Image: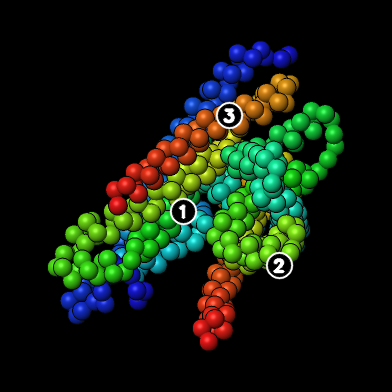
Amino acid sequence: MTPDMSDVTVQFFQGMLVTLQLSLAGFALALVVGTGLAAALVSPVPPARWAAGAYVALFRNLPLLVILILAVFGLPQTGLQLSPMTWAVLVLGLYTAAFVCETLSGGVNGVDVGQAEAARALGLSFPQSLGLIVLPQAIRSVVPPLGSLFIALTRNTALASVIGVVEISARTAQLVNDNVSTIVVIVGSASGYLIINLPAAWMVRRLERRAVFAR
Amino acid sequence: MTQSVLFDALGPRGRRKVRVFSVAVAVAFVAAATVIAIPLDSAGFFDFARWAQALDWRIFTGSYLPGLLNTLLAAVGGVVLAIVISVIVTAGRLSHHRTIRFIAIVYTEFFRAMPVLLLIWIPFLLSLHAKLETSGLPFVVVGLGLYNGAALAEILRAGIVALPSGQTDAATALGLSRLQVLRLVIFPQVVRAMLPAILAQMVIVLKDTSLGFIVTYPELLRQGSTVGAYLSDALLQVYIVIAGIYFIIAYGLTLSIRLLGRRLSAQRHASISVAGDPVLT
C-alpha cells in the first residue's frame, strides 16, 4: 500500500513540528545551563571552574547517542522515569550546554584584555565593567557560533527517533517501510530540516550584520 | 590562577572572598552529591554484584573489546572516505568551471544539513527492502564519509581562504600548473594550518560511529545493549562502562590534539621569525 502525496506531506509536516519543538526547547535549556556554566568557568572561584571544566570535558567526549540511551534505558533502574520527549529535550539541552559554555567563555576571554583594564582604570566596578564593556563585545563575537550550534542541535534531534520520539527521521523511516519512492523520502526529510535551518542561518547572518553596525 | 580578562590579580580581601566562595561551592557540591546518592543507593546502584557483572573480564574480552575494534574499524573507514571526498569537493570548489563549483557547493550544503543518522539509516532501510543481506559496516562508513567529507571540505576551504593569495600567485608565476599549485603549495600549507581542526573532526567521526547502533552494526554501543539485555539487572552499569570506554578514548585524543596544536603554533612562530630574517637583512 502506498500512501498518496498529500498524506506524505502531512506526515513530514507533523514530524517537522516535533523536530522544531525539540530544537527550540533543547536550545533554550542549553542557553540557560551553558550561560551558568560559562559564568562558573570565567569566575575566580577554583571549585566552580573545575566543575564547569569537568562538565564540558565529560559531555564533549561522550557520543550523544550513548548519553541518550544510557538515560532512557539505564536510568529507569534507579526509579527515574520520564517520557521520551522529556528525555530527548533534557539530553539534547544538557549536551549542547557544554558547547554553549565553551563558546561563551571563549567569547569573554576573546575580548581584548586592555578593554577590561581600561574599564577598571576608569573606576568602573566589576558588574559595570562586565555589563557595559566586556559582555556587549563578547556577545557580538559569539552570535555566529551560537547560530551554528542551533543548526547542529537541529540535526542532532534526529537521534530522538531512536528512543521513540516521532520526529522527521522517524517519519522518514516509516515512509521508507511504507514503500514511498526513495526520491520523495530523501527530498522530504531534507527539506524538513532545511525549512528549520535555512531561516535560522538567515537570522544569524542578519544579527551578525546588525552587531557589526552597532560596534 | 589563570589570567582572565575579567579581574586583576586579587588582593588580600579578594583572596579571602574567593576562599569563602570556594568553600561554599565545595559544600554545595558535596550536599548535592549526597542528595543524589541516597536514592541511587536505595535503588541498588552501588551494589557490588551489579558492578562485578558489568566489569566481568569475560565480558570485556568477549563483547566490549570486539565492539571497540568494530568502532575503530568504522571510524578509520569513515575518516578515509571523508578525506577522499573532502579533497575532491575542495578541488571542485576551486575549479574554473561554474558547473563543477556549483555541484561542489550543493554537495557541501546538502550533506551538512542532513543528520548523519538519516544518511546511515535511509540506505540501510532501502537495502532491507531490496532484501539485500549485508552487514551494517558499509552503511556506517558511507554515512560518516558523506557527512564528514562535507564538514572537512568546509574546514579546508576556511584554510584556503586564510592563506595569503601571494602563495598562489608566486606558484603560478613559477610556471606550476593549477593542479601542481594545489598539490605542492596550497594543500600542504592548509593541512598543516588546519591540522588541529581536521583531527578534532576525526574525534567527531569516532563519536558518531555509535550511530552504527541503529543499523545493528556490532560496535561498542550495540555490544553494550546486547550485554545489557542478558544482564538486565546491571543494564545501567553496563552503559556506564561503555560510556567510560568512549570517554577515555575521545578525551585521550582531544588532549593529544590540544598538545599538538600548541606545539604547531609554537613552531609556526619560530619559523616566521626565521623566515623573516633574510628579508630584514
The chain letter for the residue carrying disc 3 is A
The chain letter for the residue carrying disc 1 is A
Residue positioned most to the left: A123
Mark 1 closeness class: few <14, some 14–19, many ≥20 residues within 10 Å:
many
**Residue type indicated by callout 3:** Ser
- Do the residues at pointers 2 and 3 share their chain? no
Q: CA distance from mark 2 to mark 3?
A: 47 Å
- Asked if residue B75 lies left or right of residue A58, the reply is right
**Residue type indicated by callout 2:** Leu
Mark 3 closeness class: few <14, some 14–19, many ≥20 residues within 10 Å:
some
- For disc 2, the marked residue is B174
Tag in front: 2 or 3: 2
Name the spot of residue A27 as percent of width and height, x first.
42, 42
- For disc 1, the marked residue is A99
Q: Are marks 2 and 3 in contact (CB under 8 Å)?
A: no
Total marks in image: 3
Mark 2 closeness class: few <14, some 14–19, many ≥20 residues within 10 Å:
few
Mark 3 and mark 1 lie on one chain; the one further toward the N terminus is 1
Occupied quadrant, residue B1: bottom left
Q: Which mark is residue A31?
A: none
- Do the residues at pointers 3 and 1 share their chain? yes
Name the spot of residue B113 as percent of width and height, x first.
58, 39
Q: Regarding mark 3 in the picture, which secondary structure is present there?
A: helix
Q: Regarding mark 1 in the picture, which secondary structure is present there?
A: helix
Q: Are marks 1 and 2 in contact (CB under 8 Å)?
A: no
Q: Could one spot residue B248 in this view of the protein?
A: no
Q: CA distance from mark 3 to mark 1?
A: 26 Å
